Image (tube, rainbow, N blue to C red):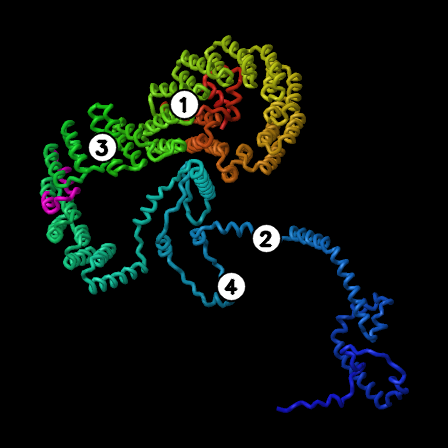
Amino acid sequence: MAVPRRDFLNEPAPENYVAGLGRGATGFTTRSDIGPAREGPSEDAIKEELAKRAEQLQNGIQNGENEAQENADDNEDEERFRDNENDEGLFASGAYDEDDREADRIYQEVDDRMDSRRRARREERESREQEEFESKNPKISNQFADLKRALSAVSDDEWASLPGVGDLTGKNRRSRKQIQSQRRFYAVPDSILASGSQIGAYENTAPADEDGSASSIAGTITDFRQISFAKDKMLLMRLDQAGTDSVMGTTNIDPKGYLTSLSSSVVKTSNKVSDTGNNRELLLSLVKSNPKNANGWIALAKLEEQDNRLTAARKYIQQGCENCPTNEDVWLENIKLNPPDYGKVIAANAVQHIPRSVTIWQQAMKLETETMAKKKIVRKALENIPQSVTLWKEAVGLESDPRDARILLARATSLIPLAVELWISLARLETEENARKVLNKARQAVRTSPEIWIEAARLEEKAGNVSRVEMVISRGISELQRRGGMLTRDQWIEEAEKCEIEDKPITCQAIIHATLGQGLEQESSEPIWIEDAQSALSKNCFATARAIFAYALRVFPSSITLWNQAIVLEKSHGSAQNLFAILEKSVEACPSAKDLWLLYAKECLAVSDLDGARSVLSRAFENNPDDQDIWLTAVDIEAENNEHDKARMLLAQAREGAGTERIWIKSVVLERQLKDSTRALDLVNGGLQKYPRSSKLWILKAQIYESDKLPEQAREVYVLGTKACPHNVTLWILYSRLEEADLTRSRSVLERAALANRKNERLWLERIRVEKRAANLPQARTLVASALQECPVSGAIWAESVSMESRTQRKPRLIDALKKCDNDPIVIAAIAKLFYAERKREKAKSWLEKAIKADSDNGDHWALLYKLLDTTGASQAEKDTFYKQFFDADPRHGEQWPQIAKDVNNFGKTKIELLELTAQAISF
């Protein structure tokens, strides 16, 4: 390899070269270093240098001609705005030394420091400007972000049902003329089109209108009536689906039946045919290679059966029986594939090869139609299999004479002494004395069987020896614990439920009392026992639940929860005697439980036992002398029975004793009901002195002035009341209604109320209705929009907005309301009103029942249903059912119901009369 020559020492040094400067050598310069003056360059050198510069200039001009026009304006601007103090031109050829570099570094550090001080504010400003720009100019991806997220909820079936893209211009780039030139069109006869249109068609025609009209020329004339009808039908389906699934918790689709219908529909396809052929070849290969494989013969026969080739299936299964004569499943499949007459022959061959197969003997019995033939077969089977409990039960079941059955069972128990079922069956066929002997033998044969002890207890109950039932169960549990045959607590409860189903309640109760506390700690057992009782109630085992509550109350006699649940059980599924007995026990066990006393008095009134109710409340006073609920209940009883002086006396005593706010309110209400305004006004003033922030007392005082036609005094009371109770919405609403003659003042009152009570749906609703009553619908709609922004889940506001829509827009609006309000009962009632307006009374009734189920405490919904039943001519049985449900619900709330029920003019009226008045005040 050639070595480069190192002759750089003989070459001239570069310009401005200083020896040693690169490694830091420094020094000073003297005149001797500079030397004498030298001559300048020669004339030839100058000419050569000038020629080089001229050539470089010429090349620069040629390269810059293309950019001259583009940079003309820029150069002009640069020349125009050039800084005269800039030293770029002056010192461009100067040397850039270390001092200059240090100065530039210092200036750069100063600039960076100043920039860092302003960076935070600058970045914040830039971020704010960027956000403002993006909000005004959003990206397309951001605009459709919510729709993209919604695509995650699309199911596979919905994706599969999307129509295919019809435009193929993106895939096929050929011109339209070329495509059209390659197409050929032929005239098709009308008969082919007519017949082809019916192939694979489905009947999806919308039903005709009520007048029977329908489109006569399908596909040629658009019938807008049919389109409107179909649209309404789809909306109704969506309403039913939205309401039924969420409100009622049920569905109109039977999933089991639907799946069964799907499985029963067999669709033949080319793929399935090919699969069947492949499977047949595989199974044939299997049985040829291994003819002793019974499963292969069975699978091959089933395959042929599914392919409707019964002859081939019978042939293959017969070959299977010949190759696998001791396999039970092959013979059973052969019997199933053949008709009954030939199946008997196959069964006879089968029992010869497998004489100890119980299943084949049973199948042979099923093929016979005469009882004698079945007896003959089962006895032949018992000769071969005398230890089979199933065959002995079959034999006993074929006997019509109890004596013959006892003989068979006696023989069976001697052969199979451990078969508890046979012992129990024999005991039930014997007399009482013999049954005891049979059960004693069974107990000695099977020491660990609880069924025998339970059967012994049932025998004693059947014989009327009730006192011995519990003794037998106790002895049985002791024996089972000693022998190791004890059941778990849940299993004992199941046995008790079986005894109740077989009408043996005493045995059921004995089992519960003996085993309910098994394996539980007493401190934590109460909720477990309540759960056990609820489980029994869900199975309609009321005696079991009653026994569980009786045992639990024996352990926890002061548990109010247990007493309440036991009372509810007797009230719903017991007799009146048992109900009053358990009520008496409850108040004796918990004398300080006011709810039990009140419930006791209420049940006495329900059976018109006024003296009994007074006696109960008198005893309640002794144990709870200062309880306001007991005082108020006693006052209600006296007032409802026109004993007004006694009611006033009780209230006076209560004001002196308890003196609570409710007692003062009840005193005022009673005087108003008795039309004594002066005394009512004195009482309300006395109550306000003790309870100045009682909103109900302020309302009562204002209503007294209004009933006496004194609006100025009522206005003054409302002003004082709203100052004392600014957060009571009812007070503000009544004040606004007093001022409604002057719309401006009424609006002002409601606006002040809204300032004190933000996002209150009742205030928004009243503001909307004030505008509606003033016939100012545009303002009402504006308020509806604002109200839905503040209260988006208010069913009352949604229902009011629906009532303001046109008829065509109400159904879509109701669907939105159902989704937003999570099936609010007021929205459901609005749907019922819509159906009633469309004369669809059955649907209206269904939706009203849903609304009542969602909120049974709303009296307005009961009134609507009552009005619907009255107008549609319901039967007396339907009305009786309605009245029972209404009294059980005892509604207290709503819009019209409380106003009518508390109206002093309706004092003394029954609940049915109040319901009628409410139905008259409410319109669909």
- Apparent side of residue 558 relative to residue 793 in the rendered image (left or right): left
Sequence-wise, the earlier of marks 1 and 3 is 3
- What residue is shown with label 3? 453
Name which quarter of the figure residue 785 lies in. top right
Residue count near mark 2 (Cα–Cα under 10 Å), binned few <14, some 14–19, many ≥20: few
- What residue is shown with label 1? 883
746 within the magenta span? no
Above/below status of 661 relative to 370: above
Residue occupying the point 35% across, 53% down? 200
Q: Position of residue 337 (x, y in %)?
A: 18, 52
Sequence-wise, the earlier of marks 2 and 1 is 2
Residue count near mark 4 (Cα–Cα under 10 Å), binned few <14, some 14–19, many ≥20: few
Residue occupying the point 76% across, 76% down? 64
Which region shows up in magenta?
379-400
Name which quarter of the figure residue 494 lies in. top left
392 within the magenta span? yes
Q: Secondary structure at mark 2?
A: helix
Q: Position of residue 195 (x, y in %)?
A: 35, 54
Sequence-wise, the earlier of marks 4 and 2 is 2
Residue 170, labelled with which disc? Answer: 4
Relative depth, front residue between 429 and 905: 429
- What residue is shown with label 2? 142
Label 4 close to label 3 by CB (< 8 Å) = no
Q: Main secondary structure of the magenta part?
A: helix
